[in-house]
Amino acid sequence: MRVKRNIVVRRAPGNPREGRLVLAHGIRRAALGRGGVAALKREGDGTTPLGRFPIRQVLYRADRMRRPRTPFPIHAIRAEDGWCEDPADRNYNRLVKLSPRLSADRLTRDDALYDLVLVLGHNDRPRVKGRGSAIFVHLARPGYAPTAGCIALSRHDLLMLLAELRRGSAIVVM
């Protein structure tokens, strides 16, 4: 079987907040940002950015699932882990240790959304203040409710996506 390098996500016809992900086992449903898809992403706008995004790392909840097999750097999420969303902070758009003075998205959520996360290379090299942080591929809410700008899949489809990815793979949002 031919190895895929780029996995394509296209907007679904008639619904800007829903996408279609093309995998070897078929076309799968995906939730996109509540603001749809946009070429110019801004922090907090709720849009999923257009473009090609390499996979930087995989995060997972060791208390909820086994360590997934992946060629990417992997990190078991700890209780103190967060993702900095404050454009004024020097750690903007990075994995951080939570603190009361830091504006960060807690990665140990009560729901399952961040049980398995692919961190996409969006606005990270270089980081530009206000251009958007934390663009992840994560687990979908019931009914594929829109995200804050991420791509969300069912657990099965996210595991199938992870199985298809190879070093050098990227997610392409069209």
Image (cartoon, helix red, strand yellow):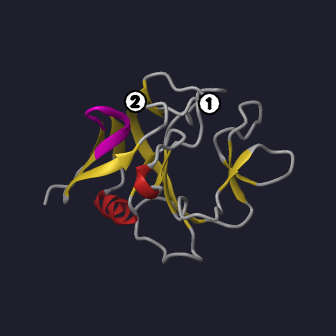
97 w.r.t. 85: above or below: below
Is 14 inside the magenta-drawn segment? yes
Residue on which the image places disc 1: 43
Q: Nearer the viewer, residue 52 or 115?
A: 115
The quarter of the displayed image where residue 69 is located: bottom left
Q: Give the Cα separation between the discs numbered 2 and 1.
A: 15 Å
The quarter of the displayed image where residue 109 is located: bottom right
Q: Nearer the viewer, residue 111 or 133?
A: 111
Determine whether label 2 and label 1 are within 8 Å by CB. no
The location of residue 100, given as percent across then percent down, is: 86, 50
Q: Nearer the viewer, residue 156 or 53?
A: 156
Is 128 inside the magenta-drawn segment? no
Looking at the image, can residue 174 be seen?
no
Q: Amino acid at mark 2?
A: Leu
For residue 63, side relative to residue 117 (left or right): right
Dominant SS type (magenta): strand
Residue on which the image places disc 2: 50
Q: Quadrant of the C terminus?
A: top left
Q: Amino acid at mark 1?
A: Glu
- Which residue corresponds to the image point at 47% horizontal and 43% vertical from the top-left? 146
- Of helix, strand and loop, which one carries label 1? loop
- Which residue corresponds to the image point at 31% horizontal and 63% vertical from the top-left? 160
Magenta range is: 11-20
Looking at the image, can residue 21 be seen?
yes
4 w.r.t. 87: above or below: below
